Image: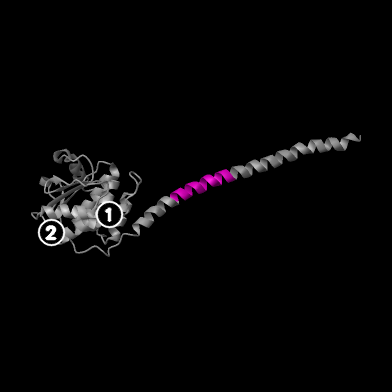
Amino acid sequence: MPKEPRQRNRDHKPKGDTLTRNLVLGMVGLVVVSGVIFTVLDRQSAKKTDFDVAIEKVDASNNGPILNASIEPTDDFGIAFNKGTLPKIDIWEDPQCSFCKDFETEIGDYLDELVRANQAEVTYRMTSFLGNESVQAANAAFCAADEGRFLAYHKAIYTVQGREGSGTYTVPNLLEIGNRLGMTSESFTSCVTENKYADRAKSVYDSMPKYNVKGTPTVFINGTVWQRSGVEFNLDEFRAAVEAAK
């Protein structure tokens, strides 16, 4: 009989241990699941924030006057300004090309000045060899050209450029860029949404061998490839080459 209470204690102890262990395991599982959820949400939030930060830099304050471009199939759908003016500058680029962004950052404002002052024939050849996002961005650039806003849109594309294939150049994002530049017409919206000029982007891509273009950015000044002296794009060096070609 004296052993009975101790026996009852032994019978109860495993049950208490099991309950405690289950509670601990449940809490650990909850922490792990919560961590996974918050990690996913943090990644999604970071991705959204990255684009939001970039798009905030895009607005219509520097649009300038409407400029109409010449886009002809006989010129392989180059987006040309000031046809017939010398020097003649041809720029081959892919919207997802990071080096093209570097070129635009350093040289873009100078090219805009040449176009707006009618001091050179400047042709942008929007190729798309880096995938579907490049096609969509090039298509949107053609749509912006229809609105007379190619230069502003072209600059904005590189302002928001993300990593290759990162999902930056989706239709909603490309429309948002246009909207921030004042392009809210039904014609622009449908042009971007329906990928109206995807065939033009393909034609530009297909014409690269014809011009012996093997990568981007490639720039011709009066038909001769501009060769920079170093890795970086130097505005003074490029300006000197253009001035020498006049």
Magenta-span inclusion, residue 42: yes
Q: Position of residue 182 (x, y in %)?
A: 26, 62
User: In which quadrant is the C terminus drawn?
Assistant: bottom left
Q: Nearer the viewer, residue 177 or 9?
A: 177
Residue 213 shows in this picture: yes
Q: What's the mark number on residue 119?
A: 2
Q: Nearer the viewer, residue 227 or 112?
A: 227
Q: Position of residue 167 (x, y in %)?
A: 35, 47
Element assignment for label 1: helix
Region rendered in magenta: 31-44
Residue type at numbered disc 1: Thr
Q: What's the mark number on residue 105?
A: 1
Q: Position of residue 113 (x, y in %)?
A: 18, 60
Residue that protrudes farthest toward the left in the picture = 84
Q: What's the mark number on residue 125?
A: none
Which residue is at a point 61% across and 43% down the rendered structure image?
Answer: 28
